[in-house]
Amino acid sequence: MPGWMVRGCLVVVALLALTGCESTPPSATGPDSRVAVNGALTALSGQTAVAYDLAGGAVLNVTGKGLVQGVLSLRGQQVSALRADGDLYLRAPAEHWRAQGMAAARAAEYGTRWARSQLAFDPGWSFAPPIVAQALRAGLAGAARPSRITLADGLDVFDLAGLRITAVPPYRVVSFPPALLGPAVAQTLGDTTIGVRALQPDELGELRTAFDGAVDSLGQPFVAGPVVATAVSDNTLRCTATGSCTDTVQVSNKLLGDAPRASARLVLKSSVTSSRLGGQDCGQELVTPLNAATTMACSVRYTLPKLAGTAKVSAVPVVTAEPVATVDTEELKQSAATELGP
């Protein structure tokens, strides 16, 4: 009987101890990082538009459907970016284009205007909020146990392989390293941290205005990559008794490379000279279909001296060309209105 009573007491004590462990309040262990990560990435995936803070103060705005407006920091250079209808347009300094292998004169011209271009990654795809959320989930596979830290501004966050998420609700993504979006993004943007801020509903109108303004400034953007070769087949210079001389050339162009939805921008520069009258330059710009022939002309006017005799006049024309993109600005604006509101 005494032995039985001892065993009974031991069982009762064990049950009480087990019950005590199960009754520990979950809040005593602090916030669950898994809940925070899932909540933050789910919230990011559903955002209409997000502003990404990049190196050098650059801010890139990207919508859920891939519209892009803002600035990229590429190898220390600030480059304006616009993406619409699946095409990426960049407005970059000449140094950017020289780094792509362009000659100095051509790079200088590209540095004055927008150009339809490509990067090692498509920011409209790689930075679309749903795609970023998906990439961050995949990048965290096998990540070490998160740490909880307090940032310089006092914000309490979880840090998982560089991904920082608020440690208290509402959970949101604060920042992440480019490497979590893949090597192409990391190599292009460099060693930096990408800040994340979801645009509030009252900010979407401001983004729409900025997007429309960028579209209006596109003009006739170059198409970076392909080249247009030109050939002058005929050159005729005619001068009148009033001192006007017109140089007319027949020129053909040929696209070297691929440039869908594009035309050729031809630039004629003619140097008209006379040993008796001096020299003058004239020119003409013309946008024509690719792989076609056309006529170009420009004129100069001389003040004729009050002397008898004739003056010999000659012209040396030079025609250069660049592919330019065909842009329907109203269609691009409508795509923004559909996503961001009128």
Image (tube, helix red, strand yellow):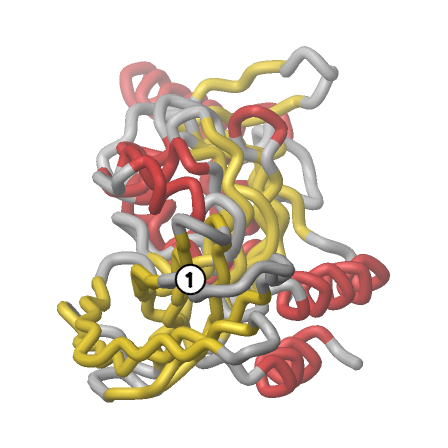
- Look at 26% across and 48% down and name the residue there: 120
Q: Nearer the viewer, residue 89 or 206?
A: 89
Residue at the far left in the pictured view: 256
Vertical comparison of 16 with 315: above or below: above
Q: Which residue is mark 1?
A: 311
- Look at 68% across and 11% down and name the residue there: 152
Numbered marks: total? 1
Q: Nearer the viewer, residue 236 or 183?
A: 236
Q: Quadrant of the N terminus?
A: top left
- Look at 46% across and 60% down and name the residue there: 89
Q: Nearer the viewer, residue 209 or 219?
A: 219
Give SS at disc 1.
loop
- Look at 36% across and 62% down and name the residue there: 312
Q: Position of residue 98 (x, y in %)?
A: 31, 35
Q: Nearer the viewer, residue 139 or 68?
A: 68
Position of residue 93 in the picture relative to residue 6 (left or right)? right
Q: Position of residue 110 (x, y in %)?
A: 43, 49
Q: Position of residue 183 (x, y in %)?
A: 23, 38
